Image: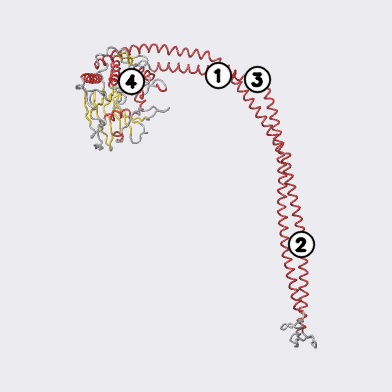
Amino acid sequence: MVTLNVECELFEVDGVVHELRFGAPMTALTGETRSGKSTVLEVLGWTLGVDGAKLMSAAAACSRVGFIARIGGSRWRITRSTVDRSQDVSFTHGTLGTEEHHPVKRSEARRSAADVFQDLLGIPRLGAGRTRVTLDLLMPWFYARQRDLPNDYLGRQSNEQRSAVGRVLLGADDETVDALRQEAASRTKEWRSVSNRVKRILRDREERELPSVEDLQRRAAQWTAQHEKASLRAREASAALSRLHAELAALQKKASVAEEARGVARAAADERERTVQLLEAAAAEARGRLAGLREAATDPSLCPKCVRPLDLTGLSEDDCPVCRRPDPERLQRAEQLKRRMSQTQEAAERAQEAARRASEAADAARGRARDADRAVVEASAAAQVFAQDVVAPQQQAVVEAEAAVRELAARLEQNAEHLRELAELTELRGRLPQLEKDKNAAEAAYAAARNDTDLMVKQATDRWSHHMLRRMQACDPEITTVSIDPADFSVTINGSAFDARAVAGHGMTRTNVSVLLALRDTALEVPAMPVPQFLIVDGPFTGLGSSPEDQRTGAALLDGLTDLATSEDLSGVGGQVIIACTELHGTPGPAVREIRTNFTDGAIPGLPPRQPTTK
């Protein structure tokens, strides 16, 4: 039995660590409701990351909380940050001064803070799943919460959970028994898995009417040959398609070249058209100049003023026909005009000839453009016809050939899967006898160990029942029989099964406290039980009034809790009890230290006074 004693709780406020010391075997936090008594108790579980433990507002106002505890022969300081709640929990060894850090939640690689604390207590973590005995399941057996105490038996644990924890605390189940249980479970799981797999394969073969192994092998040979031929056809079809694609690319290239040539021809024709237009414009301009010169060279036949015919009678070649005066330079000007007209005539004729030749060149360019258009149409049509009539059928042939290959490959894979299943079936059938033999041997070994431990549990529960009867009779003399079931540790009182719904209230509180006290009475007689003489009870007197019967019950509970706190184990180490209540019932002895609390000051040292709320 490992001893556990919580010396004090720690509350860090504004960088200063304040202690709430539990200096007596039994400490009673008393005072009005909402003064922080439960807050102080919940800090113990919250520091270790126990599921369901709450960090209430007053404790959350501190930057760090924790406690100092003596576990066996070692003293540990355990603290946790309330600011960054994901930080590891700090464990400091009081003698060695070494510091360890453990996460709030366990992982594959690291134990949680709760796991480390449980290991320090020497309580093995046995089992698996929801019934694995961790500190989360142990907590109701060491800390009876106010919300559970009057309503639920042992924290509302299921029968399976209660059985797992109880057997560990009674010292019946240990690592050896748990290893045998795990071995039996593992062997049974393996045997059941193989057996179910064999049944499933046989059922599937029967439902799908699968052929024999000889037929499967014959099919495999046949389909393999067909698959090889189909693969060869597919490769040949793909190679032919590649060659056709090359020919199609050449045709498309030819069409592309024709398209480029057409573009060049059209551009040349357009350029010729522009040249013709320019030359025709130049010829027209020359003809205009020639007409003007001709008009200037012709003598007028009408008077420019009265527009009457001029009389040329008696005028010489040097006389002006208009004014009838001699003009010595008139003949010279006429000669000059004739020369200019001759030159202009020649220029007009040359321009006209150039325009004609340009027009002929433009016609030729337009002809070449039309030829280029026809070449493009023919090349594009040839490529399109080749693609539709030659390439497309070959592509379809490739698709069909590849589909045939895939279908045969799928048949072969399915056939191979059936062959693998048959091989697996043969192998599993060969393993089943040995697996069943190993399973039976593991189950027999576990059953033998379980029979031995069941006897230990029966003997321990007899002692436990005896002590609980004594505890219950101190509260109620009319109780004559108490029995604790060794299967799930449920309680029968006066021959009637303990029904939480029928006894909710102080009857439930009395039973919960008595069963926890009686368990520790049993541990004093059975040192192999890993149950420390330590207990926390929040609200042990809940529901008690001032009647003589309630007064007797309250005094008996106080005496029982005090008795646990002052009892010593075989090594002479005493126990510890911490309770919280509004007021004590009965007369506390010298082993009881009462810490009075109130709403204003609260139970946590170091925090500023609280102001009462006004409605």
Label 3 neighbour load within 10 Å: few <14, some 14-19, many 20+:
some
Q: To which residue does mark 1 refer?
A: 200
Evaluate if marks 3 and 2 touch, with contact meaning CB atoms under 8 Å apart. no
Q: Position of residue 63 (x, y in %)?
A: 31, 36
At numbered mark 1, what does the secondary structure look like: helix, strand or loop? helix
Please state which amino acid type lies under the numbered disc 3.
Gln
Label 1 neighbour load within 10 Å: few <14, some 14-19, many 20+:
few
Evaluate if marks 1 and 2 touch, with contact meaning CB atoms under 8 Å apart. no
Q: Quadrant of the C terminus?
A: top left
Going from N to C along the chain, the mark reached first, 4 or 1, is: 1
Q: Position of residue 496 (x, y in %)?
A: 32, 14
Q: To which residue does mark 3 refer?
A: 217
Please state which amino acid type lies under the numbered disc 4.
Arg
Question: What coloring was used for the rendering?
Answer: secondary structure
Q: To which residue does mark 2 refer?
A: 359
| 176 or 599, nearer to the observer | 599
Quarter location, residue 275: bottom right
Q: To which residue does mark 4 refer?
A: 501
The residue lying at 78 percent from left, 66 percent from top is 353
Going from N to C along the chain, the mark reached first, 1 or 3, is: 1
Evaluate if marks 1 and 3 touch, with contact meaning CB atoms under 8 Å apart. no
Quarter location, residue 396: top right
The residue lying at 65 percent from left, 28 percent from top is 407
Q: CA distance from mark 4 to mark 1?
A: 47 Å
Residue 422 appears in the figure: no
Q: Position of residue 479 (x, y in %)?
A: 27, 14
Quarter location, residue 359: bottom right
Q: Position of residue 51 (x, y in %)?
A: 36, 27
At numbered mark 4, what does the secondary structure look like: helix, strand or loop? helix
Going from N to C along the chain, the mark reached first, 3 or 2, is: 3
Going from N to C along the chain, the mark reached first, 4 or 2, is: 2
Residue 262 appears in the figure: yes
